Image (cartoon, rainbow, N blue to C red):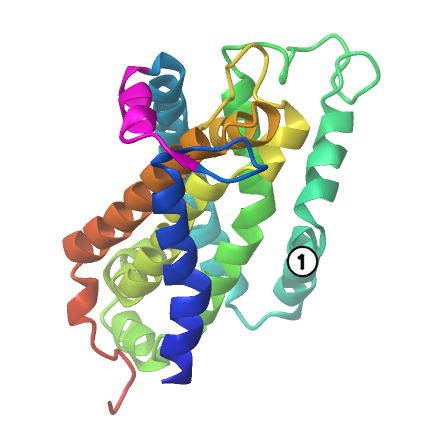
Amino acid sequence: MPAFGFFALFAVLPMLLVIYLSFTAWDGLGTPALNGGENWSRLLEDSEARASVWRTLVLMVVSWLVQTPIALLIGVWAAGKQRSRAVLSSIFFLPLLLSTAAIALLWQALLEPNFGAFVGGPLFLGDPDIALYTVVLVISWQFIPFHTLLYQGAARAVPPSLYEAATIDGASRVSKFRHITLPQLRYTIVTSSVLMLVGSLTTFDTVLILTNGGPGTATRILPLHMYITGFSGFEMGYASAIAVVLVVLGTALSLAVMRWSGFRQMTSQQEGS
């Protein structure tokens, strides 16, 4: 019951408030005035909002494609018991200790075209064709260690007897990874994927600090479009409509991944259970 109360207070109530505001005209001051479905009609005709949705989907998919294989391979490797792996893993996990703002400022300085680490190279944050992919790389650098930790913990829980039996049967290392490790990490892959995909819908601060949506609108993803609309344009009602779209997209995406992966039928993979 207390958990339901906290959920209702900090999740359901704010969502209901945002839905209400999406039907109002409000500049952040005074009393919101109902304007019917004007914000939603405007949203359907807003070409920049549609472009922002597309950029958000690109960022989400590319982030998943970059982060998942790297985190999976490093996590399985780090699950070994050698001391050298533990030392290297400790260094690799250092980004987890840094705040998002610090990471964004660090990469902004590194990629600065005149005084950064790539003087004379491509304009990573200034070229509209590669700026969004540069943002993806920075986000991946920040979050791969977290997902690696998930895979490392899951890989260490795989029963050693499975590998011992495979070794007796003459299975190669690749065959063990394909037929034992990957199936045993199935639910961890699903969990990690949901966190990555839904997390991409809430990515905001990194993009704001790195590019502020530029150059032009090349990196203006939907959460940033919502922020600029609400806190720069003082159109809180319209920004609330965009927020509702984000909530619906995130919820639908989570349900789709869980249904597609069979996550609801999850059973324990531990020995003896």
Q: Quadrant of the N terminus?
A: bottom left
Q: Classify 217 as above or below 24.
A: above
Q: Please indicate, yes or no, whether residue 154 appears anywhere in the rendered image.
A: no
Which of the 4 quarters of the picture holds residue 146?
A: bottom right
Residue 263 at x, y percent in the picture? 21, 64
Q: Residue at x 27, y 61 (%)?
A: 186
Q: Residue at x 25, y 63 (%)?
A: 183
Q: Classify 36 as above or below 155.
A: above
Dominant SS type (magenta): helix
Residue 91 at x, y percent in the picture? 70, 56
Q: Quadrant of the C terminus?
A: bottom left
Which of the 4 quarters of the picture holds residue 168?
A: bottom left
First to last magenta residue range: 33-45
> Is residue 152 toward the left or the right of residue 114 in the image?
left
Q: Is residue 247 magenta?
A: no
Q: Is residue 42 magenta?
A: yes
Q: Residue at x 47, y 43 (%)?
A: 202
Regarding mark 1 in the picture, which secondary structure is present there? Answer: helix
Which residue corresponds to mark 1? 88
Residue 267 at x, y percent in the picture? 20, 77
Q: Please indicate, yes or no, whether residue 266 appears anywhere in the rendered image.
A: yes
